[in-house]
């Protein structure tokens, strides 16, 4: 039976639609397959989660350690400031007065400080040229404290206190 022109056109349209649908189905199937291949398996996902948790733990630990060190340094500094720099038994000044020349041919400076035998802190006047370089937890730059301790010093370095 011959197919008339009109029926032929309908068949053509139907076939074209079918081809388009097939294309979309294949594209979707390929996309799904690619996505599935990229996604981690349950075991891989568990490993990734464990690694992320470990990184977070390490970061937290580092932060806590930083906080502890800062606190310790602050406590150490506060302790030195609270130290009366007095001998605990005799109640006398526990510092030693020190004068020493620092530098070479380019220039010499006189470093002056008192060292507390109890807390090991070095107290220098505020205008000390070492202020920028030595300003660690074992140094105090305070002219008032320096003057008070230097005036009361029982022992001067290099000097026999019983002479
Ligand atoms: Zn002290």
Image (spheres, rainbow, N blue to C red):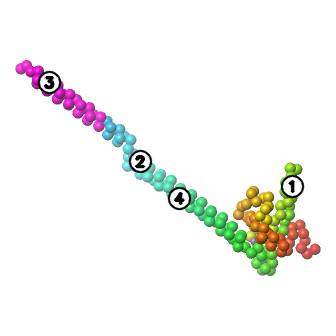
In primary-sequence order, the first of circles 1 and 4 is: 4
In primary-sequence order, the first of circles 3 and 1 is: 3
Spatial distance from mark 2 to mark 4, Cα to Cα? 24 Å
Mark 2–mark 1 contact, CB under 8 Å? no
Which residue lies under the disc numbered 1?
108
SS at mark 3 in the image:
helix
Per the rendered image, the range of residues in magenta is 1-28
SS at mark 4 in the image:
helix
SS at mark 1 in the image:
strand
**Which mark, by number, is residue 132?**
none
Residue drawn where x is 66% and y is 64% of the image = 73
Which residue lies under the disc numbered 4?
60
Q: How many marks?
A: 4
Spatial distance from mark 3 to mark 2, Cα to Cα? 54 Å
| Front of the two marks 1 and 4 | 1
In the image, residue 118 lies at what x, y percent?
A: 76, 72
User: Mark 4: few, some, or many residues within 10 Å (few <14, many ≥20)?
Assistant: few
Which residue lies under the disc numbered 3?
9
What secondary structure do most residues of the magenta stretch adopt?
helix
Mark 2–mark 4 contact, CB under 8 Å? no
Spatial distance from mark 3 to mark 4, Cα to Cα? 72 Å
Mark 2 lies within 8 Å of ligand 1 (Cβ measured): no
Decide if residue 20 is on the left or right side of residue 84: left
Which residue lies under the disc numbered 2?
44
Viewer-proximal residue, 153 or 55?
A: 153
Mark 3–mark 2 contact, CB under 8 Å? no
101 is higher (above) or lower (below) than 92:
above
| Front of the two marks 3 and 4 | 3
Residue drawn where x is 65% and y is 66% of the image = 74
């Amino acid at each position: 039976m011959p197919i008339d022109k009109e029926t032929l056109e309908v068949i053509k349209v139907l076939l074209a639609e079918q081809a388009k649908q097939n294309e979309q189905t294949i594209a979707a199937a390929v996309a799904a397959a690619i996505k599935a291949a990229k996604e981690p398996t349950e075991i891989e996902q568990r490993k990734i989660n464990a690694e992320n948790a470990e990184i977070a733990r390490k970061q937290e630990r580092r932060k806590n350690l930083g906080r502890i060190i800062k606190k310790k340094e602050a406590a150490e500094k506060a302790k030195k400031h609270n130290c009366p720099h007095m001998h605990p038994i005799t109640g006398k000044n526990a510092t030693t007065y020190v004068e020493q020349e620092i530098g070479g041919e380019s220039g010499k400076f006189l470093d002056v400080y008192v060292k507390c035998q109890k807390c090991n802190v070095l107290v220098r006047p505020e205008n000390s040229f070492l202020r920028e370089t030595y300003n660690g937890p074992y140094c105090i730059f305070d002219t008032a404290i320096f003057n008070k301790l230097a005036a009361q010093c029982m022992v001067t370095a290099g000097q026999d206190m019983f002479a």
